[in-house]
Structure formats: structure tokens, C-alpha cells
Amino acid sequence: MRIELEKRPQVSKLFGLLSPLLALALALIAGTIMFAIMGKDPVEALDAFFVEPLLEVWSLHELAIKAGPLILIAVGLCLCYRSNNWNIGAEGQFTMGAIAGSFIPIVFTDWHSPIMLPLMLIAGAVGGALYAAIPALLKAHFNTNEILTSLMLVYIAQLFLDWLSRGPWRDPQGHNFPQSIDFPPEGVLPAIWADSGRAHWGIVFAVIAAILAWFVMKYTLKGFEISVLGQSARAGRFAGFSSRKMVWFAFLVSGALSGLAGISEVSGSIGHLQPAISPGYGFTAIIVAFLARLNPLGAILSGLVLALTYLGGEAAQLSPGISAKAASVFQGLLLFFVLSCDTLIYYKIRVVWSRVRGGAA
């Protein structure tokens, strides 16, 4: 006996559209069971996750801060995944973008200019793109599995950041704390509404990137090329498209957006470089992309939902006393149900019974 997945000849458009909502509902049910097993009140826990962060103005600003990098990274991942390039290393590209953009204010401490911040943002995007070019090169020219290479590069980037923060870039006046000097005012991403909260322009960059990516996917030849090569590389070759060039395009764009998210997070929310700059944005953005059905505009809404789980996880630690690990499990459940619902909508499970003859045995 063996179990196979057989593609359905016809797929219900209604279920295709409702798949993310169904996955979210199943995740809520599974989360309720999980909280009950932990001995916590499920209603109180879900209220802390999804309601409390929306009741105060300052928490809405925090929601925008956390949604910004998630949306930016997810937009790049949508382009990657729709072209059948599986970039799992956005967290590393996020980190290298933060490092590359921080180079200017940390190394050139005596330089103060209005162009510092634009140069930092450009350097961050370039740094992320160059780091993403490594798995692109390995896949395009050596046929290496990009899932493994991009994922392994995440840990190299994180260790490199840790070494810089504790070593060459440590603030000599920082009382031995592992962090760089504080960025000057010219290197800090300003808040959108300084009087009401600290939400910065990173969320604006994310929304603009999502709109531009959606326009490219829907109305340009490059978007058509992404869709064709993603569905069938052979059909793309007949149309004159190059799979190798698409690998480079997808990884460079995705890496640039991840790098821009990294330097926006460091210059807008933190103000200096330190060993821990991300709660896992690069990995959570994978959930955002799939929850959005690989639609850049959908990444805005799904990014806000996943950002809400970050804030809700922090609130749940205070009120019902739920650990941060439980919030991570909840995010993982959401990804599991998204992939499961899509699989069962587009494929049907078939059990194949086969007898092993004596001679064959």
C-alpha cells in the first residue's frame, strides 16, 4: 500500500479563495486546544493575542513597526516562490542588509550629512541582494539546492553579526555591552507621526513595495515570465524565457527587499547594531507569503495578522502567562494549516493497493 497525491482536474475557485481563512480558523481551533492543554483560559489567551494589541494607539504603532519588515520580506518571497525559486534564507539577507547599511554611521563617525540615511538604505538593499546572490549563483551555475544553501547562510550571517557587535564594532563607551555606537540623527529613520508614536517609514516602504510588485506581476512582461517559469520551466523555454536569468532576478529582488527591511529595522526601531535585531522576521515572512497566496497585495493584510501574533505573544506573557515559545508554535500551526488546506484543495489523496508477487519479492 502506498499513498499518492493526485492533482484534481478542476479546482473550486471558492475554496481556493477561502483557503487562507479556513487555515486561520483551523489554527485558532488548534490554538484553543493547545492553550487548554497548557492549563490556560483559551478565551483569555486569544483575547491577548488578537484583541488587546488593537486597543491602544501606541500598540498600533508597534503593530506597524513589526508589520513593516514582514511585508517587505514577504513581497520578495512572493516573487521568488511564484517563479519556483525557494529562498528560505531571507533572515540572513535581512541581517546582512542591516550590517551593510550600518557600516556608514559606525565607521564614518565624524561624517554628518542629510544624504547619510538614503545611502544607508541603498547600502542595506545592496547588501541583502549580494548575500542572496550566493544561493542564486550556486543554483544557476551548479544546480545546487537553493533551500539548503540559503538556509545555511542564515546562521553564517547571524554569527557574523554577533562577532561584529561583540568585537570590531563594539561601542568603546558602551560599558562593555555588545552593541555598536548609537546612530547619529542623520542616520535614524524618522517616525511618521512623532507626536503619537514611534512607527517609522519602514511600513511605508513595505506598502509601496507591495503595490509595485503587484503591478509588475499583473501588468508587465516580467510578471508573465515569472508566472510561466514558475508553472513550467519547459513552457518558459519555448516562450524564450531563461530559467537561469529568472533565478538571478528572483533572488536579487528578494534579497534587496530583505536587506532594506533589515536596515529599516535597525535605523528606525533600534538605533544601533546589536547581536539580536530580529525575532525571526525572515522565517515568519514565509508564513506571510503563503497566507497571502503569493499575492504581494495580500502580503499587506497577512503581514499585519502575523505582526499581531508577535504583539499578542508579548501581551499573553503578561496576562495569561503564556511563554514566547507558545506564540512561535501558534505561528507554525498557521503555516501548517495554510499548506495543508492548499494541498487538499489542489490535490486529492489516493491510496494505491499493490500485491507483491512471489517472483518479484
Image (cartoon, helix red, strand yellow):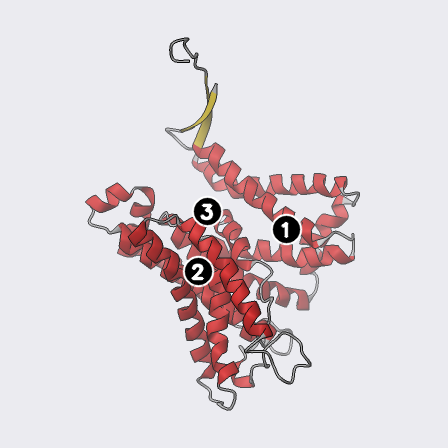
Q: Amino acid at mark 2?
A: Ala
**Between 355 and 196, which is closer to the camera in this rendering?**
355
The location of residue 305, given as percent across then percent down, is 58, 54
Circle 3: is it few (<14), some (14-19), or many (20+) Cα within 10 Å?
many
Amino acid type shown at disc 3: Arg
Residue at the outermost top position: 358
Please report the residue visible at 56 percent of the width from the left and 85 percent of the height from the top: 184
Distance CA(mark 1)–CA(mark 3): 21 Å
Instruction: Report the residue marked by disc 1.
Output: 328
Say above or below: 44 vs 120.
above
Mark 1 residue type: Ser
* Residue denoted by label 2: 210
Point out the tag, 2 or 1, that comes first from the N-terminus: 2
On the image, the x and y values in percent for residue 249 come to 32, 58
Q: From the viewer's perspective, is residue 164 above or below residue 210? A: below
Can you tell which mark lies on residue 55?
A: none
Q: Report if the CB atoms under discs 2 and 3 are less than 8 Å apart.
A: no
Residue 293 marker:
3
Label located before the other in sequence (1 or 3): 3
Which residue is located at x 48 percent, y 53 percent?
151
